[in-house]
Image (tube, rainbow, N blue to C red):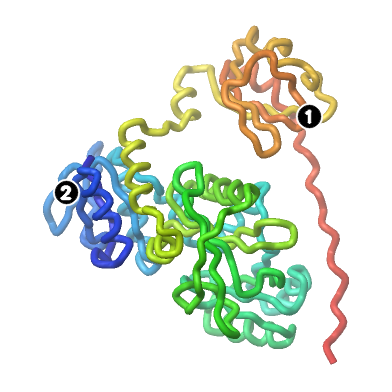
Amino acid sequence: MKLSILSCSPKCYSSRRLIEAAQKRGHKVEVLNTLRLAIGLDQGDPDLFYYGKPLKETDAILPRIGTSITRYGTAVVRQFEQMDVYTPNTAAGISNSRDKLRSLQILSRHDVGIPTTAYVDDKRDVESALERVGGAPVIIKLLEGTQGVGVILADKIEIAKAIVETLQSSKQQVLLQKFVAESKGKDVRAFVIGDRVVAAIRRVAQGQEFRSNVHRGGKAEAITLDPAYEEAAVRAAQIMGLRVCGVDMLEGKDGPQIMEVNSSPGFEGIEGATKLDIAGEVIDYIEDQVKFPEIDIRQRLTISRGYSVADIHIPEGSIYQGQTIEATGLRDQDVVVLTLKRKSSVISNPKGSRVLEADDTLLCYGKSEHMKSLIPSEKKPRKMKKLPKPMAPEA
């Protein structure tokens, strides 16, 4: 396999470890300076040039895109995608994860825990937003920031309002986030590759510092994750469209709270704490995908005219509730059940004898005209949240 690592830091720990792991396995590997890759566009012929010369063919890339070059870096990754070069992290996935607001918006519609968060533009809306996230103390975050930079803990409402107003006056956009008190000074980093967590550490802040980032002096220790945290980390990675990433979580009283999904996680802290060959795991995964790539089943199966793929939800009281898949007669209508999702579990190629329950979701492939009749015409009513009681003014 020939692997190209996209990075502007070929001598950093992560790049060196990836090169070492790839060479140890007999692969050809090179580090390409992302900023020296030029995009060429022509009819039916997307291309890339490196230092002005046509780029030689490669089997896969591993993007290590820095925050400061996200826009150009993701354009380069997208160009590799158009050239059918495998990448574990797509341009869309990197872009979504890099924007704190966008990533939380995407995660918020799924069944994964996130800290209650608010985003406002007008200073007149700040006070009500603070109420919604639980009042003080509150976390204030810049939309763009890494390694703990731009994260502020305000212990009083008036201080929080003043900080937000000051930042907004300098054209900075901020998030207001509930302070998870029970997790103060510590968080969990899970390293996800494919559909599993290969390593996890707990990062603990030192002294009076509440930010646990290793770059801010935090100490890392290897841990074995609770299954609920493993599941949350893998779900978050899948939702963001990333196959190699670090998922940062707070340990809340109600379970894992996803803070961030990092598309270019560092190796030094987690390899040092766990003594595991994380770089080797990444290389092995990419090699497997080059040999046996994942496919987008919706794109592949909808090629046949008149056929489509759709999720069929089984609501409470449905005629299918309590029936076996075989008894539903779906197969007789030229509809095949590919997977059955029940709560947090996904059952592939379920047997016809499996009994359907309320709230099951079936991923089906079949004739579009039959599929439409199976999808409920009305969506579930949206649950309305109760507004918090106004906070008493501080003395």
Q: Which residue is more in the foreground, 288 or 219?
A: 219
Q: Which residue is more in the foreground, 98 or 269?
A: 269
Q: Position of residue 161 (x, y in %)?
A: 69, 83
State whether residue 347 is above or below residue 22: above
Q: Residue at x 70, y 26 (%)?
A: 375
Q: Dot 1: what SS?
A: loop
Q: Position of residue 237 (x, y in %)?
A: 52, 49
Query: Quadrant where the C terminus lies?
Result: bottom right
Q: Dot 2: what SS?
A: loop
Q: Position of residue 150 (x, y in %)?
A: 52, 77
Can the viewer see residue 42? no
Are dots 2 and 1 in contact, CB under 8 Å?
Answer: no
Q: Residue at x 63, y 85 (%)?
A: 163
Q: Position of residue 219 (x, y in %)?
A: 50, 73
Q: Residue at x 24, y 50 (%)?
A: 4
Q: Amino acid at mark 2?
A: Leu
- Residue underneath mark 2: 55
Query: Could you tell whether 165 is left or right of 171 in the image?
Result: right
The numbered mark at residue 358 is 1
Q: Amino acid at mark 1?
A: Ala
The numbered mark at residue 42 is none
